[in-house]
Image: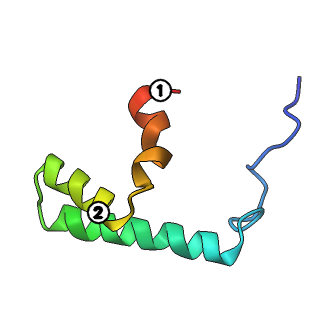
């Protein structure tokens, strides 16, 4: 059975507006800066939540596995 949609052959921006990609890039860059600063895990978490209060909601599937 073949999946209805495969992202393997899709371009990196397919389905993602440039603003969404830029926002994601910004989060990743900010996270990288915090990691390079060698913050303790709790401080890193607190900084991400302060930077973007909705960040926790978007990470819920990682935390709760849902």
Instruction: Count numbered badges in the picture.
Output: 2
Task: Say which label, 1 or 2, has the lower sequence index.
Answer: 2
Taking the image as shown, residue 17 lies to the left or right of residue 5, namely: left
Q: Is residue 25 above or below residue 15?
A: below
The residue beneath circle 1 is 65
Horizontal and vertical percent position of residue 41: 16, 48
In the picture shown, does residue 62 fall above or below 32?
above
* Nearest-to-viewer mark from 1 and 2: 2
Q: Label 1: few (<14), some or many (≥20) within 10 Å? A: few
Q: Which residue sits at x=71%, y=65%?
A: 16
Query: For residue 49, which quarter of the picture?
Result: bottom left
The reply to whether callout 1 and callout 2 are in contact (CB within 8 Å) is no
Viewer-side residue, 43 vs 50: 50
Q: State the separation of the CA atoms marked 1 and 2.
A: 23 Å
Give the left or right position of residue 29, taking residue 22 as reference.
Answer: left
Q: Secondary structure at mark 2?
A: helix
In which quadrant of the rendered image does the N terminus lie?
top right
| Residue at which label 2 appears | 50
Left or right: residue 38 compared with residue 48? left
Q: Residue 40: horizontal and vertical position, in percent?
A: 10, 51
Residue 39's x, y, as percent? 12, 58
Q: Choose top left, top right, bottom left or bottom right for residue 18.
A: bottom right
In the rendered image, residue 51, in percent from the top left (x then y), is placed at: 33, 67
Secondary structure type for disc 1: loop
């Amino acid at each position: 059975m073949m999946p209805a949609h495969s992202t393997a052959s899709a371009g990196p921006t397919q389905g993602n507006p440039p603003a969404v990609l830029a926002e994601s890039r910004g989060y990743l860059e900010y996270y990288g800066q915090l990691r390079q600063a060698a913050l303790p895990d709790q401080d890193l978490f607190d900084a991400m939540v302060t930077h973007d209060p909705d960040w926790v909601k978007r990470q819920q599937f990682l935390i709760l596995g849902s």
